[in-house]
Every structure is written in C-alpha cells, then in structure tokens.
Image (cartoon, rainbow, N blue to C red):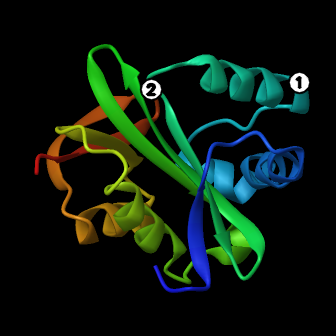
Amino acid sequence: MDHHQRIERGLGATRDLGTLFEFQADPEASAMAAFPSRDRPAFLEHEAKIKADPSAITRTIVAGGGVVGSIGSWEVEGERDVGFLIGRDHWGNGYATAALRAFLDVELHRPLHAHVADHNVGSRRVLEKCGFVLDHSAQEEDVLEHVLVLTD
C-alpha cells in the first residue's frame, strides 16, 4: 500500500459503520456480491456479532483520508474465509488488491478460502493477483459460486 492508503484495525467506529452500511446497502454492490444487503438494525447486529467473535479479524480500508471499504476473515464450518467490500464509487482504483495484500500479512492462517460469484469478475481478479487459485465451483441457489484458496 502506498502512503495514501491503509487498513485500520477493527470495524466499529461510528463514523466507519455509517459509511460501510451505505456501501453494503448499494443495490449494485449487493448484486455484484450476490449477497443481500441488510437494513440498518440487521447490519448493526451483524457487526456486533463480528466484534464479539474472537476468531474474526476485521479492518477498515482507508484511502485519501476516507473510508473506501472493509476486509476481514472468519471461521465457518472448519474453514477460514476472507472477504472484502469496496464502496462502488471506489471500484477500479486498486484498493481491494492493495488491501488484500496488506491483510495477508495480518491473516497468516492457511489455507484461506474466498467465495466469489461467477459474475463478480473484478473480485476474482483481485484474489488471483494475490495468489488465490480456483479450488472448485458450485451452484448456490441461483448463483454459480467459485471457491478460491490461498495455500502459502
């Protein structure tokens, strides 16, 4: 990351949560992620659950003095997963790739898995640039999902 971009420990600052809520509520971003957005109470409840989970590692992605997204990892069914969200106005600026590279210095667990919808080409490219490789694909309801894995 250059000096204009960084990841900051933990989500939860009130100023960050409002921005991150808006990012995940964006219909186009929600469609790209193939994950339904949450209303404000559900979003805040989910963030509190993450904050209470000792296995979760979360960071806010900051660039130019403002929040541009979030990144985190967590345990699910014996698997360590990683995911990131960049506000739509910030897509295409390299923030996700830089943030994931920096995050991989914090999150040392391997293998590390990422689930990405087939139509989310940008996120898949970010993962591949950072060393993730396709493990398998599966149809999840009405979305073809690819699972990529980082082993080293």
Q: Please tell me the numbered disc located at residue 141.
A: 2
Above or below, 98 relative to 22: below
Q: Residue furthest top?
A: 77
Q: Amino acid at mark 2?
A: Glu
Q: Earlier in the sequence, mark 1 or mark 2?
A: 1
Q: Nearer the viewer, residue 29 or 107?
A: 107
Q: Is 24 displayed left or right of 58 in the figure?
A: right
Above or below, 126 relative to 64: above
Q: Is 76 displayed left or right of 112 in the figure?
A: right
SS of the residue under disc 2 = loop
The residue shown at (61%, 85%) is 4
Q: Please tell me the numbered disc located at residue 118.
A: none
Q: Nearer the viewer, residue 95 or 25?
A: 95
The residue shown at (66%, 56%) is 29
User: Residue 127 at what x, y percent from top left?
Assistant: 31, 61
User: Residue 35 at what x, y percent from top left?
Assistant: 59, 38
Q: Quadrant of residue 86?
A: bottom right
Q: Quadrant of residue 53?
A: top right
User: Residue 67 at what x, y percent from top left?
Assistant: 74, 65
Q: Is 8 displayed left or right of 138 in the figure?
A: right
Residue 21 at least partly seen: yes
Q: Nearer the viewer, mark 1 or mark 2?
A: 1
Real-space CA distance between mark 1 and mark 2, rounded to the nearest whole angstrom: 26 Å
Report crowding for label 2: few under 14, some 14 to 19, many 20 or more residues within 10 A (C-alpha): few
User: Residue 92 at what x, y percent from top left?
Assistant: 55, 81
SS of the residue under disc 1 = helix
Q: Amino acid at mark 1?
A: Pro
Residue indicated by mark 1: 41
